[in-house]
Image (spheres, rainbow, N blue to C red):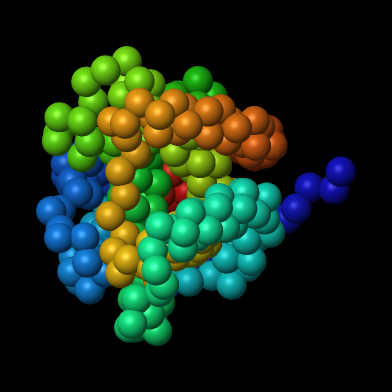
Amino acid sequence: MKEEPHVDDTHVCTIPSAARNRRRARIGLAVIWFVPSDGSLANMMFIRLGLTIVMFAIMAVAAGCNIIVPNAKSIGLSFKKSIYPLVVALVMGVFVLLGTAMKNEGMVSDWPLQLALVIMLCLLVGTFEEGLFRGIVFSGLLARFGETRRGLIGAVIVSSLIFGFVHVTPSIMNGQVVTGLDMAQAALKTLQAGILGAFLAALFLKTRNIWGIALVHGLNDLFVMLGDALFSGTTSTTYVNNDAMMASASVVMYGVFFLLYIPIIVSTVRMLKQVEVPCKGPFADRWS
């Protein structure tokens, strides 16, 4: 199979020293993504807008401008590599949409506004979360451990599990994780989101740009969140259901997802095998 050319467009930007970058990476690692919200799209959008600006400022200061300047080749390659994960998300989104439609009498009266808001929200969520988990957490781990293949893989796994665990943190903080079924749902959601996070980390290494994976992430979320936005005007999502029947159904659903995610895991492994080590990431003096 012919290997695709590596995307390495350069932009004029001053890149700080590696030592200063490591200190700034530690600061970035302390940033918490979860900010309380009433669940409305407008409220969440403005919160995510502020957090996204903060993320991009941290990346620009710590890593230079290369990874945050939009790059058409990187974006195109990201979508090309993400066709299958996006198809899986679309299928899931159709089921969510149908389920939400059956529980509600019809779409909310201001559905055009809600549609516009959820599109903007998903774009902001994608850019913020990729900026935090791939641009800062993953890059910070690479700066420390990217000298070896084992360190590279460890950085991918740790940052991805953090990304997955954050999704169930609200349920844990709200006291929803009590029974064995609750714990199973939390663990499975962490693993499911972690697999997607590892794929995005590998794609980040291949494209060396944040925008491609941010847009893929945003579109993935849009497919899943669209139903709730149009039929209830909110995107509040819980990944731990305390109803025994619903919880059992969730566990079965995650099992199906893991089967569907096998090609994603294979693609992730292949991309990581192509990465040359040492790979210190964007927080080094230059991305080697």
Q: Residue furthest top?
A: 180
Asked whether 175 or 152 is in front, the reply is: 175
Q: Position of residue 66 (x, y in %)?
A: 43, 63
Residue 94 shows in the view: yes
The quarter of the displayed image where residue 284 is located: top left
Task: Look at the image and tell me whether residue 214 can be seen.
Answer: no
Classify the position of the N terminus by image quarter: top right
Q: Nearer the viewer, residue 102 or 274?
A: 102
In this picture, residue 144 sits left or right of residue 255: left
In the rendered view, tell whether residue 278 sits above or below residue 98: above
- Residue 142's spot in the image, x, y percent? 40, 35
| Image coordinates for residue 222, horizontal then vertical, percent | 46, 63
Residue at the right extreme? 1
Q: Nearer the viewer, residue 186 or 85?
A: 186
Vertical side of 189 occupied by 58: above or below: below
Name of the residue lying farthest toward the front: 105
**For residue 115, which quarter of the picture?**
bottom left
Identified at 35% across, 20% down, the residue is 181
Q: Residue at x 48, y 54 (%)?
A: 99
> What percent of the width, then of the height, locates residue 200?
51, 46
